[in-house]
Amino acid sequence: MTTYHVLEVKGLNIFYRKAGNPDKPVILLLHGFPSASHMFRDLIPVLEKDYHVIAPDYPGFGNTTSPDREEFDYTFDHITEIIEAFVNKLGLEKYALYVFDYGAPIGFRLAMHHPERVTAIISQNGNIYKEGLGSKWAAREDYWKNPTSEKRQSYRTAFAPETIKHQYIDGTQENKVSPDGYTLDIAYMARPKNDEKQLDLIFDYQTNVKMYPQFQQYIRKHQPPLLAVWGKNDVSFIPEGAKAFKKDLPNAEIHLLDSGHFALETHAEEIGKLILDFLKRNHI
């Protein structure tokens, strides 16, 4: 069964979920925006019989400490530093990475820092290719090149309740998505002072796109077993991002599911089975 824990890391209380036998191979689940580790609530029970599963919340997300911006730089490099310290403190020497949305640039940074630790990568709408960026990213690139206060403020819509809800339900069959996930995310995003922290991360996302060539170089060099299982109706990270893995990893396994961005909301059982089969085929 899943248990719930807090680990002190660099003065922060990192909340995490874990399940499964610690003697079995580890899967590290890295969540996305605007969510937290609760997005894995239906996947963890599928994996826990065969794997030791660990899912942390990032600083500023979920139940982890959310320090003030004056005390903590909300950048992807800094969040990766905290998650890497979390991994080190848990003593995780080998793990498969499940990367989704924000979890992709964090996870691929971890992999670049310690390629010897990564046994496999599961990318669920976790993008590292320009081909995978949907049409909305053109406006973001304009913002990154020409940042103004007005443009920054316009991105408050990214964590408005209706936007969050539509991130969950767009591209899915009607009445198939529980309100539990997006209702909790709406509550997390509405916490005092959270808005500016999230706006910092939206601006810093440009560093991830700039690092795409480095992420690609990492997988070309190290050839980790990779499973890309994507909601094909995602408008943020489109299916071409999943297919692009084949350029650098000819043996990558690609599955496109009839779902949206938060594919676990509708396909957790199917994704879990694909992960189990993939890891077993690769003797992990």
Image: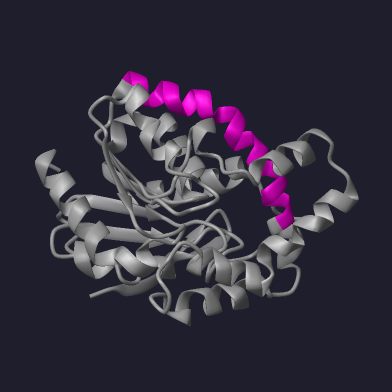
Task: Report which quarter residue 272 is drawn in.
Answer: bottom left
Quarter of the picture containing the N terminus is: bottom left
Choose between 69 and 230: the one closer to the eye. 230
Residue 40 locus on image (x, y percent): 36, 66
- Is 204 contained in the magenta span? yes
Is residue 186 depicted above or below 113 in this figure? below
Is residue 36 depicted above or below 69 in this figure? below
Residue 268 in the figure: left or right of residue 185:
left
Q: Provide the major secondary structure of the magenta segment.
A: helix
Choose between 149 and 142: the one closer to the eye. 142
Q: Residue at x 44, y 45 (%)?
A: 126
- Visible in this render: residue 15? no
| Residue stretch rendered in magenta on the structure | 199-221
Choose between 174 and 191: the one closer to the eye. 174
Residue 68 in the figure: left or right of residue 20:
right
Residue 96 in the figure: left or right of residue 31:
left
Task: Report which quarter residue 205 is drawn in.
Answer: top right
- Is 261 contained in the magenta span? no
Is residue 183 depicted above or below 279 in this figure? below
- Visible in this render: residue 222? yes
Is residue 237 depicted above or below 142 in this figure? below
Residue 170 locus on image (x, y percent): 51, 64
Residue 273 locus on image (x, y percent): 18, 58
Task: Report which quarter residue 133 is drawn in.
Answer: top right
Q: Residue at x 71, y 58 (%)?
A: 197
Residue at the far right: name it. 149
Quarter of the picture containing the C terminus is: top left
